[in-house]
Image: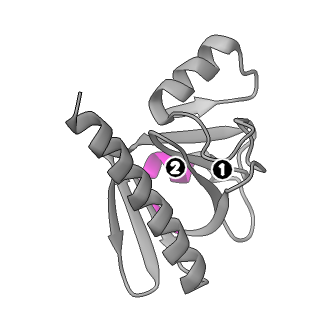
Amino acid sequence: MLFNLSNPDTPLLEQLRGVVGVALVLPDELSPRAAGIQQFVIIDANDDIIRLIQGALGILTCQIEVRTLGLLIWFQETIAPMVLALPYHQLALFKGGDYLQLHSHPWRLKLLIEDEAVSREFQRKLFAQRAILHHKNAFK
């Protein structure tokens, strides 16, 4: 789900937290500068994301935060602060030689791996959080 955070109100923030959960690192703030966020260069994306960041000049980047129920992907190059919320149960991750690809219908992002250690740490956190969520849901 794509959220416009130019005027966040309590119901919007509650809806967003309902999709991706709370932050892994306190305090639980919704900010592209929150602790634990990693920056990636966007190589390719689906048409909706391309239209969203179309006016940006230079290298297109996004900040990704691993949260308890999903990923928050911040796009800084937009007019209004936009965030894409992808829940783990709808997320597929593919790793190529120098890129990561995230899919969650209808969204697709292909991200450049500039630092292999950063990429490994991001994947480790993502898979660990997904496993914790899967384990909790298995015993409900």
Residue 20: horizontal and vertical position, in percent? 49, 36
Q: Residue at x 75, y 28 (%)?
A: 6
Q: Amino acid at mark 1?
A: Phe
Residue 16: horizontal and vertical position, in percent? 55, 27
Residue 67: horizontal and vertical position, in percent? 54, 44
Task: Looking at the picture, tell me which residue is in the foreground, 17 or 108.
Answer: 17
Colour basis: one colour
Number of other residues with Cα within 10 Å of mark 1, as a class: few under 14, some 14 to 19, many 20 or more:
many
Give the extent of the magenta segment. 43-51
Residue at the spot of label 1: 75
Q: Quadrant of residue 60?
A: bottom right
Q: Amino acid at mark 2?
A: Ile
Q: Is residue 15 above or below residue 40?
A: above
**Magenta-span inclusion, residue 137:** no
Residue 132: horizontal and vertical position, in percent? 37, 48
Residue at the spot of label 2: 49
Q: Is residue 135 visible?
A: yes
Could you say whether the residue bearing mark 2 is in a helix, strand or loop? helix
Q: Quadrant of residue 57?
A: bottom right
Q: Is residue 112 visible?
A: no
Q: How many marks?
A: 2
Please give left or right for residue 97 compared with residue 53 in the image. left
Task: Looking at the picture, tell me which residue is in the foreground, 114 or 78.
Answer: 114
Please give left or right for residue 126 compared with residue 64 in the image. left
Task: Looking at the picture, tell me which residue is in the foreground, 99 or 129.
Answer: 129
Q: Is residue 55 above or below residue 84?
A: below
Quadrant in the picture for the C terminus: top left
Q: Earlier in the sequence, mark 2 or mark 1?
A: 2
